[in-house]
Image (cartoon, grey):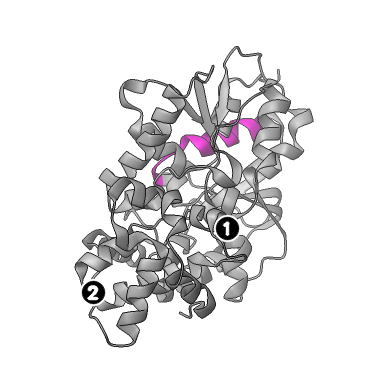
Amino acid sequence: MDHDIKSLRQCIYCHNFCKFSCPSFKTSKDQKIIQNQKNYLVYLHENKDIEIDEIFGRSVYLCNDCKRCETYCIYKDKNVQINNRYSKELIFKAGFAPKKIYEIEKNLINTHNIFGMENTIEKNNLYSKQYDIFIYLGDFVRFLEPGIFTSLEKLLKNLNINYIYDSNEVSDGIIALDLGMEKISKELMRLNFNRINKYSFKKLIILDPYSYKNFKEDYKKYGFVFDCEILHYSEYIEELINKIRVFKTEDKIKYFDPCRLGRGMKIYESPRNILTGLFNADNINFFKNKEESECCGGYISLYDENLARLISSNVIEDFINSGYDADVLITACPLCLNNLKCANENNRIKIYDILEYISLNLEIKK
């Protein structure tokens, strides 16, 4: 895997402005997570000045690619993720990644998903019919937050929309790529691309922002181009707002921007338009929102639950202690949803995905 030399050198000679924005650094105080420190150590290793080890390997994997550092970086057009993938691949191949990373590798090889679990989604393998939409769930929806999918099903059935999904879905390859497993990622992309193209549909709707970013960007880079419109579910639901009927609610809502959906794909308005359009929600922003939004801990939770829990706890404390006149926190990412719920001790606040919240208040057509 190549890396971005210009971005790497900009980091090396910078004065750490990004460290004040990094959720992992602020929580762990590990200097080696910061982009300029990490990139400098990679540079020294490539020049044979130092050897990498498990300590450095752990630090490299504590970056979640949340892109907050890019928001505060003094250089424009920063490409942090490509260098993060490069450093993780370097560590992974050297055998110094956290042990759980190699467990994820085995799971992806043996079961084609990151959790090593059998599919629990109801069988649905009809290829011949033309469908309005194909739904891609992603590993985090399938195995962590399946309620997001069942909520969408409820809505689609209520609107008489013709849909299909693959009950034997293959992991999209994005987490494999982010964790330094490029070879496995390319094979998963190939398998997934071929399986999806067995179906006939008009639009490809993605439930997970991680998968969405992968389908829109990485699949093209590796030569897998879908001949259809690809939408995150929030973009699709925004198109349906005038057809959806929900009951009035007295809930006071705050919206939490997911890193991959917001900073990653610049989708800020669709979720807000849904919440304001359907529920008349106003003043829904965190004091840090959109490109400045905090991180939930992201996929770090796959191999360092404690650090991810601490990062998510900061978000929960912000909600509780910031004087918000609100009692419901809503997001649009299964990993954000799961991490925030895990950090929500004693269920102090109500936390939902947008689809779950719509389903909870949906007025069913008779």
Of 327 and 59, which appears nearest the observer? 59
Is 7 situated left or right of 232 in this image?
A: left
Task: Tell me the residue that label 1 is attached to.
Answer: 213
Q: Amino acid at mark 1?
A: Lys
Is 144 included in the stretch rendered in magenta?
Answer: yes
Q: Residue 196 appears in which quarter of the rendering?
A: bottom right
Crowding around mark 2 (Cα neighbors within 10 Å: few <14, some 14 to 19, many 20+) is: some
- Residue 33 is situated, as x and y percent measured from the top left of the image, at 34, 60
Helix, strand or loop status at disc 1: helix
Between the residue at mark 1 and the residue at mark 2, the CA separation in whole angstroms equals 28 Å
Q: Residue 55 appears in which quarter of the rendering?
A: bottom left
Dot 1 and dot 2 residues touching (CB under 8 Å): no
Q: Amino acid at mark 2?
A: Gly
Residue under the point 42% across and 74% down? 86
Magenta region, main secondary structure:
helix
Residue under the point 75% across and 35% down? 240
Residue under the point 50% across and 18% down? 327
From the viewer's perspective, is residue 138 above or below residue 82? above
From the viewer's perspective, is residue 62 above or below residue 155? below
Mark linked to residue 95: 2
Is 219 situated left or right of 128 in this image?
A: left
* Badge count: 2
- Residue 222 is situated, as x and y percent measured from the top left of the image, at 57, 75
From the viewer's perspective, is residue 8 above or below residue 76? below
Is 124 included in the stretch rendered in magenta?
Answer: no
Mark linked to residue 100: none
Helix, strand or loop status at disc 2: loop
Over which residues does the magenta segment extend?
143-157
Residue ranking furthest to the right: 242
Residue under the point 51% across and 77% down? 4
